[in-house]
Image (spheres, rainbow, N blue to C red):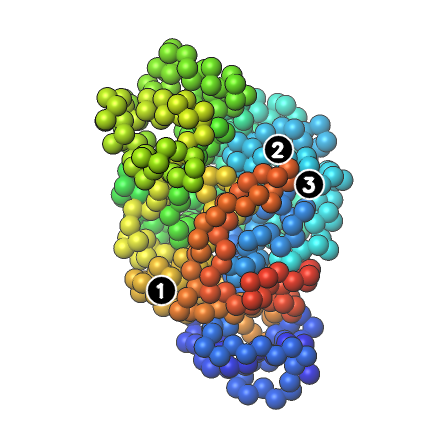
């Protein structure tokens, strides 16, 4: 008898085969049988008539590192069909990390991923320093599978201390980093992440940005011993520099025989040729035998923010970041100071922030005067005889900084352009940023949006192709063993969903963060049941008590 028997579903195996009406039998955490009218029966029988039965979805770019310590389900990942996540991106992971460096790392997470300090201080006790110690801290309470990266910045911190953010490494320090990386890979790290753009809470480059090429090359030599991944955050705001990074990744891939991935790759109005040029260069390098996978998001990014707290929206404006790091009373005083305000306006651009801020929309919800809600900052600024950056400051001060703004559809030009890009065999669907930017935008809904926008609406991908892009393809790219395919003997990670209704859901604020903090989430639409390693982890709108998530084995 099966532990779970899923009957009458449209089975999509994850490798691109056409959907077939079939049953799926699960036993002891594995897929035991797939076929029509399985007769053995099941302790639990799920009727999937009219629904798709597919492999669990895989999210290759998340920052659930801290959340997994108090929420092994990585909410809301599971309810969107995601059964495996890859945290530790962008050069940041919670291990290896010496106790004296915790405050430094928290500041980086606060700035780069917009995670509140309480997420690291109020919800769990630090009981580890090593990567194996962090793994032990999360194992046993997981409802999702985890394939963690180790961050380059924390490896530098461990070896070099404060000098990690001041200088290049010496040969003996590079050797020590290699030894430490080997230790992390032996403890289950799926690869190394690094960043060429990020800064800490004081607007200083993160440690990985002080590494010279010989350091990265030496670390990639260690990755080559294991065949593991190098993930980077390139200078995505400049296409020419991104292409140079692609060439660098290709050389590292070829030399050390490793897979590499870069994220994010954005399509936007400011750089309409960015993605075509990026993909053309990647095509050239792939033809040489290099493995360079660009990650693209399915969904547009809608960033909500106010001047009450720092925001990703100002990531490229250090003067604004500095002011938003001040305590609120000092921040208000600084914004009221004419000299400071003039500098902020000047730093927003020669056009007074028209290009950057003019299309911002004033949000409602009691945070703004009703007559302004839904209007663009550019229109309001014109009425006032101000440039948009000045209007952003004055409106905020008039409302005690509690007025919120929305930067809509970032990272997307149009869905007509995005669909063919996502369908491109070179493109790795990822960069969800799940677990980060909690007060700026909802980082989930990518999978539902893939089906609603690019399968049902535009037809850029077939249902089978869309499933393949978020199951077997990432499993193969990252080398995740026995996942991403519905096949006998493989791990029983399964999602049952309605292909006619699956969507990204409506964004809403919740107050479930440590310390009572707020975050934006999207409740799933159209996902019926999620099975992780043979047990139901989420069904009919509710989480179960199953904690069958694992640290992923690698092929």
Q: Is residue 213 visible?
A: no
Residue 120, image x, y percentages: 65, 37
| Near-viewer residue (225 or 263) | 263
Q: Which residue in the protein does label 3 denote?
A: 123
Q: For the residues marked 1 and 3, what is the alpha-carbon distance in whole angstroms?
A: 40 Å
Residue contact between numbered discs 3 and 2, judged by CB atoms under 8 Å: no
Q: Is residue 162 visible?
A: yes
Q: Disc number at residue 532?
A: none
Residue 431, image x, y percentages: 46, 48
Q: Disc number at residue 455?
A: 1
Q: In the rendered view, does 389 fall on the left or right side of 1?
A: left
The mark closer to the camera, 1 or 3, is 3
| Near-viewer residue (470 or 219) | 470
Residue 244, image x, y percentages: 38, 38
The quadrant in which residue 354 appears is top left
Q: For the residues marked 3 and 2, what is the alpha-carbon distance in whole angstroms?
A: 10 Å
């Amino acid at each position: 008898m099966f532990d779970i028997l899923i009957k009458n579903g449209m089975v999509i195996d994850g490798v691109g085969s056409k959907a077939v009406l079939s049953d799926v039998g699960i036993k002891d955490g594995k897929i035991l049988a797939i076929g029509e009218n399985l007769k053995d029966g099941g302790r639990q029988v799920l009727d999937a008539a009219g629904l798709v039965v597919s492999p669990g979805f895989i999210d290759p770019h998340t920052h659930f590192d801290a959340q997994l310590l108090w929420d092994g389900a990585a909410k809301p990942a599971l309810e969107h069909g995601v059964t495996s996540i890859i945290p530790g991106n962008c050069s940041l992971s919670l291990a290896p990390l010496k106790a004296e460096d915790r405050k430094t790392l928290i500041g980086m997470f606060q700035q780069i991923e917009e995670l509140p300090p309480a997420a690291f201080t109020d919800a769990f006790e630090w009981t580890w320093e090593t990567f194996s110690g962090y793994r032990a801290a999360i194992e046993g309470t997981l409802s999702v599978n985890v394939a963690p990266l180790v961050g380059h910045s924390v490896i530098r911190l461990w070896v070099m201390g404060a000098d990690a953010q001041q200088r290049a490494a010496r040969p003996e320090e590079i050797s020590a980093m290699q030894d430490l990386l080997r230790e992390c890979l032996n403890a289950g790290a799926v690869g190394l992440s690094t960043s060429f753009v990020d800064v800490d809470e004081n607007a200083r480059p993160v440690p990985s940005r002080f590494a010279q090429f010989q350091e990265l090359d030496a670390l990639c030599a260690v990755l080559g011993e294991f065949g593991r991944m190098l993930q980077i955050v390139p200078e995505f705001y400049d296409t020419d520099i991104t292409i140079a990074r692609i060439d660098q990744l290709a050389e590292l891939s070829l030399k050390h025989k490793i897979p590499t991935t870069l994220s994010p790759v954005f399509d936007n109005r400011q750089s309409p040729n960015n993605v075509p040029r990026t993909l053309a260069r990647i095509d050239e390098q792939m033809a040489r035998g290099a493995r360079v996978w660009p990650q693209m998001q399915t969904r547009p990014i809608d960033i909500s923010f106010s001047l009450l707290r720092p925001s990703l929206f100002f990531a490229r404006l250090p003067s604004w970041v500095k002011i938003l790091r001040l305590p609120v009373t000092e921040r208000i005083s600084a914004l009221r100071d004419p000299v400071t305000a003039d500098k902020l306006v000047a730093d927003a651009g020669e056009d007074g922030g028209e290009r950057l801020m003019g299309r911002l929309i004033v949000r409602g919800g009691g945070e703004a005067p009703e007559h302004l809600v839904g209007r663009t900052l550019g229109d309001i600024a014109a009425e006032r005889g101000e440039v948009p950056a000045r209007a952003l400051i004055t409106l905020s001060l008039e409302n005690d900084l509690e007025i919120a703004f929305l930067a809509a559809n970032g990272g997307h030009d149009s869905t007509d352009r995005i669909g063919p890009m996502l369908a491109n065999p070179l493109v790795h669907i990822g960069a969800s940023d799940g677990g980060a930017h909690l007060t700026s935008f909802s980082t989930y809904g990518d999978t539902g949006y893939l089906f609603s926008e690019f399968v049902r609406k535009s037809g850029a991908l077939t249902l089978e192709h869309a499933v393949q892009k978020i199951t077997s393809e990432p499993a193969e790219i990252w080398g995740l063993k026995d996942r991403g395919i519905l096949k006998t003997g493989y791990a029983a990670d399964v999602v049952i969903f309605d292909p006619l209704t699956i969507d990204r859901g409506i964004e809403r604020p919740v107050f479930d963060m440590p310390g009572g903090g707020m975050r934006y989430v999207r409740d799933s639409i159209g996902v019926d049941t999620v099975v992780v390693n043979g047990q139901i982890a989420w069904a009919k709108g509710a989480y179960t008590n199953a904690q069958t998530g694992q640290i992923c084995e690698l092929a």
